[in-house]
Image: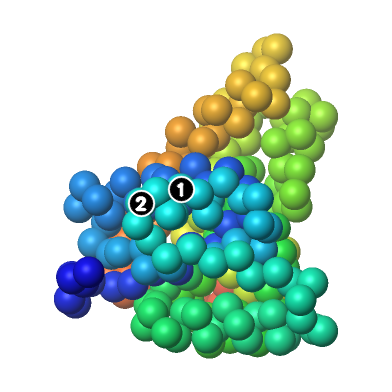
Amino acid sequence: MRRPTGVPALAVLCSGQGTNLQALLEATRTGRLRARVAVVISDRAASNALARATRAGIEAHFVDPKAYPSRGEFEQVLLTLCAAHRVRAVCLAGFMRLLSPVFVRPYAGRLLNIHPALLPAFPGAHAIRDALAWGAKVTGVTVHLVDEEVDHGPILLQELVRIAPGETEASLLKKLHRVEHRLYPQALRQVLAGRVRLTGRVARLTGA
Ligand code: GRF
């Protein structure tokens, strides 16, 4: 297969449905994002993201964390896959695993995550449920750089989503996904263009 040259390669790490992966694929396909998804990696064999990648003709790997004696060795496998594809930036898209410095350091500033809340509110795996249970009237989406703590690194973009009276987890998820699928390619574009300036933990997007 012929590969386009000069287009930055991406790795997308997923554990679940892969709708954000799909949005990134779509953005690269339509040219809204000048990049190509070179490899998709999942820590769950049943992840629908792997099926989506395969359907799109993209190399997809299930890397089983249980097959490695330590987190570091598991992450070393991820690093090797990324290196093999000369990956410029890594997107976590519903990847339900905390990465250690073994993976985070080599990709510092080029490792992104998307979270379905306005961080630092509602970090963790149940952000949508937590926002509803708290009675929040607004929530939103955050795209941030990844550091070694959960949902913690410098914020790149955020967008607010209103919580309507009677909102359910399913209806809110739908609203958040619509925003996520637009915001992730947008944030990634800024990172790939080198438009992120960091002062401490504060990120400024120079071309946004
Ligand atoms: C998204 O809501 C994202 O914000 C969170 O995990 C979910 C992944 O969804 N980190 P999908 O697998 O991309 O559909």
| Left or right: where 162 falls relative to 53 | right
Q: Are marks 2 and 1 in contact (CB under 8 Å)?
A: yes
Q: Crowding near pointer 2: few (<14 within 10 Å), some, many (20+)?
A: few
Q: Quadrant of residue 7?
A: bottom left
| Left or right: where 134 falls relative to 140 | right
Q: Is residue 57 above or below residue 77?
A: above
Q: Is residue 135 above or below residue 131?
A: above
Circle 1 SS class: helix
Query: In the image, which disc is placed on residue 68?
Result: none
> Foreground residue, 29 or 193?
29
> Foreground residue, 176 or 155?
176
Give residue 33's position: percent from left, percent from top. 27, 56
Q: How is the image coloured?
A: rainbow
Mark 1 sits on what residue? Answer: 52
Q: Quadrant of the N terminus?
A: bottom left
> Foreground residue, 203 or 93?
93
Residue visible at 70% across and 20% down in the picture: 168
Q: Is residue 46 above or below residue 134?
A: below
Q: Is residue 19 visible?
A: yes
Query: In the image, which disc is placed on residue 56?
Result: 2
Q: Quadrant of residue 44?
A: bottom right
| Left or right: where 31 falls relative to 51 | left
Give residue 184's position: percent from left, percent from top. 43, 51
Name the residue type under label 2: Ala
| Left or right: where 86 falls relative to 105 | left
Residue visible at 17% across and 76% down in the picture: 5
Residue visible at 58% across and 78% down in the picture: 78
> Foreground residue, 93 or 112?
93
Name the residue type under label 1: Arg
Q: Is residue 203 visible?
A: no
Whole-angstrom CA distance, mark 2 to mark 1, is: 6 Å
Give residue 125's position: percent from left, percent from top. 75, 49
